[in-house]
Amino acid sequence: MDDTGRDAERGRRATAAFDAAQILFDDAGSDPGRAHDLVVVIVLAREGLAALDRDGAPSPPCFVNPLHGPADRRRRIRAVDGDGRRRVCAACADAPHDRLKSLTLRIPHPGGRVPHHALRGPWIDVEYGARSSLARQVLTHLEVES
């Protein structure tokens, strides 16, 4: 692919990520029950910036804490859907197992904060973009795109 084609693809990825982030942000509003959606907004915004900064597919975020940023390693993580090798950032990959609990993003939920991956839903199903496009998942979930 030539530079023009790569630039166009990067632009499409960035636009899709930014559009999905804006639509999800507008949909979630200030509803405290939608904190998990706001994490996805941040992940999408970062994905859009990454698309503008470099070529290639976007790196999915750390499964332990999506706000840690890009994940370039794998580690066995216990989640609601069972144990599995998930993409994690370097800090989480190297952390002792007993420290992972304190590194895990916890989301406000009725009854207290829970690990983000204990919540079922489309963001976990695609592992924040590790399994398929997060922007596409958001737009489909919000019935903006099918």
Image: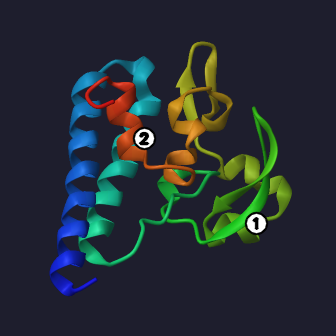
Q: Which mark is residue 95?
A: 1
* Residue linked to disc 2: 39
Display colour scheme: rainbow
Q: Is residue 29 visible?
A: no
SS state under label 1: loop
For the C terminus, the quadrant is top left
Query: x, y (%) of residue 116?
Result: 60, 36
Report which quarter residue 28 is drawn in: top left
Whether 45 is drawn above or below 92: the answer is above
Query: x, y (%) of residue 47?
Result: 35, 59
Query: x, y (%) of residue 123?
Result: 51, 37
* Of callouts 1 and 2, the N-terminal one: 2
Whether 53 is drawn above or below 42: the answer is below
Q: Which mark is residue 115?
A: none
Q: Nearer the viewer, residue 82 or 29?
A: 82
For the N terminus, the quadrant is bottom left
Q: CA distance from mark 1 to mark 2?
A: 22 Å
Q: Amino acid at mark 1?
A: Ala
- Number of numbered discs overlaid on the protein picture: 2
